[in-house]
Amino acid sequence: MTRQPDAVFVGTGHNALACACHLAKLGWTVELFEQAATPGGAVKTGEYTVPGFRHDWAAMNLSLFAGSKFHTSNAGELAQHGLKFAPTAHPFASAFPDGRWLGVSANAALTTARLRGFSEADAKAWSELTAAFGGQAEQILGLLGSPMKFRAFASFSWKAHRKLGTSGALDLARFLTMSPRAWLDETFTSPHVKALLAAWGMHLDFAPDVAGGAVFPYLEGMAGQAFGMVLGAGGADTMINAMVSMIEAHGGKVHCNADVAEILHEGGSATGIRLADGREVRASRAVIANVSPGALVRLTGGTGDVGYDQKLNTFQHAPGTMMIHVAMEALPNWTAPELKRFAYVHLAPSMDQMARTYAQAKAGLLPDEPVIVCGQPTVVDPSRAPDGKHVLWLQVRMVPGQIKGDAGGSISTTDWTEAGPAMADRVLGILDRYAPGTSASILGRHVVTPDMLEADNPNLVGGDQVCGSHHLHQHFLNRPARGYADGSTPLRNLFHTGAAVWPGGGTGAGSGMMLAEKLAGK
Ligand SMILES: Cc1cc2nc3c(=O)[nH]c(=O)nc-3n(C[C@H](O)[C@H](O)[C@H](O)COP(=O)(O)OP(=O)(O)OC[C@H]3O[C@@H](n4cnc5c(N)ncnc54)[C@H](O)[C@@H]3O)c2cc1C
């Protein structure tokens, strides 16, 4: 008779994989079941355009993973299993419609000098932020790395109070509730500087006027300058391949093309899973679901706690995203050639335009002028394309999951299958305005619409790239529901992990690592 695994996992997002690595290392037997043909969820790499050109399907920037507790605790072993990063000292920049540009590099003097070109006062403010970053980062990253149980939260608040004093602790609390615009207007004067930083809020659903969003422009700006950016060597899938290999080396199993149709439970305790093909797999210690909140309720058929189920069923998703993967003869012909050295070039000209784009996407409209994150991974890692050629990773922020209309007035369909190519033409047209003639260098393109993202990975509901809005009411102690931000659920032995659980989206493996430590009794 085959032994039951200690833990079975629904899904192989990087949080499930990190959790499984940690538990397998401690001697747990683990089996993971993934509905897709390859593991990794939103982190995968493939040749989607022309043979020889490798594209990151979704996540490209692995800085959160590289700096995560999971990675730093397992760096040696992951490297043995093939994990390799491609770092850059030139993480991000913005191109502006007036032909100017501004970028952050891992060199404080250089970055400050660039800001000085826009405003002496802003260069001074930036220098002050740089000087204070070490102390501030300790508090903010400490908070983001703390388990969100009342006791842990209270302990963090107490320590922050002792370290910062009443006034400092209240300043920190005030900052954490500020919108990007409120903080940027208070700190800087130049519209270019503000737009450069505000673009980072748009990677989540923190448009300039959304409370709680200031922390993202701040952290990305400061961390980009302190550490640069990290990509995966050869593709983001390096981190997934290494984790799968590490799990297997510790005796675990990862099954793909294995859709989990049901989470089994008896007497208030989870016992295993049933696959869509009818097979059942029991677990002796834990069932760990790396799924969206709505899916967790569906898979259990109801946990028995009506209040919890209702919170998960009404969990709110953020607007969608769309990807355009492009194989290129050459890099974009930027008006400012210095932009050719940056990993990301944001086309996000002003806070007003970002606010308008968000409002349009929320209202179901295709934005007339979306924010474009132009990723240039081959600048950092030329191995992803044949010699001298390039790939572009174009992320379109934001678009509606369900189209109701077009703010640009030229796309009449509400079906993403037809709207996708038309929207891609709009995006490439915008890129051509900043980098004339770029379209002529395109060798192949692959458009990924919100419904394609969701079809590939059901956690990306409506193309929401971070499995749930991070607005304050759904963050911290409330992610995904108050009392359950540590991955517990009302069913014994059933646990929840992934971007929907505190500390949320991105490749930082936070919820998976915290859950593993909790299960391991640490
Ligand atoms: C387009 C895009 C770009 C992004 N860019 C970045 C970036 O550059 N940097 C960054 O840090 N973050 C980025 N993110 C966010 C980040 O990638 C995600 O937040 C993170 O990878 C989510 O990890 P997860 O553990 O929640 O699992 P997911 O990646 O959501 O994976 C969950 C897995 O579970 C599987 N699954 C779900 N239900 C079932 C079931 N019933 N049976 C079997 N399997 C199931 C899914 O198929 C999937 O493989 C991006 C996301 C997207 C979509």
Image (cartoon, rainbow, N blue to C red):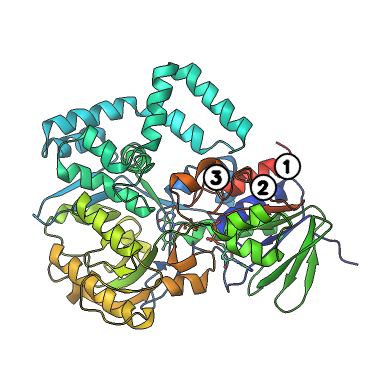
Quadrant for the C terminus, please.
Answer: top right
Please, what secondary structure does the residue beneath circle 1 have? loop
Please, what secondary structure does the residue beneath circle 3 have? helix
Of 174 and 235, the residue lying toward us:
174
Left or right: 196 in relation to 76: left
- The part of the image, by quadrant, that contains residue 389 is bottom left
Q: Judge the density around disc 3: few (<14), some (14-19), many (≥20) Cα neighbours within 10 Å.
A: some
Which residue sits at x=64%, y=57%? Answer: 309
- Earlier residue among tags 3 and 1: 3
Residue at the outermost right position: 1
Q: Which residue is mark 2?
A: 22
The spot of residue 401 in percent (x, y) is: 41, 69
- Earlier residue among tags 2 and 1: 2
**Three-letter amino acid code at the position of disc 3:** Asn
Q: Which residue is mark 3?
A: 478
The spot of residue 146 in percent (x, y) is: 56, 36
Q: Nearer the viewer, mark 2 or mark 1?
A: 1
Q: Which residue is mark 1?
A: 520
Separation of disc 2 and disc 1 at Cα? 9 Å
The numbered disc on residue 511 is: none
Residue at the outermost left position: 98
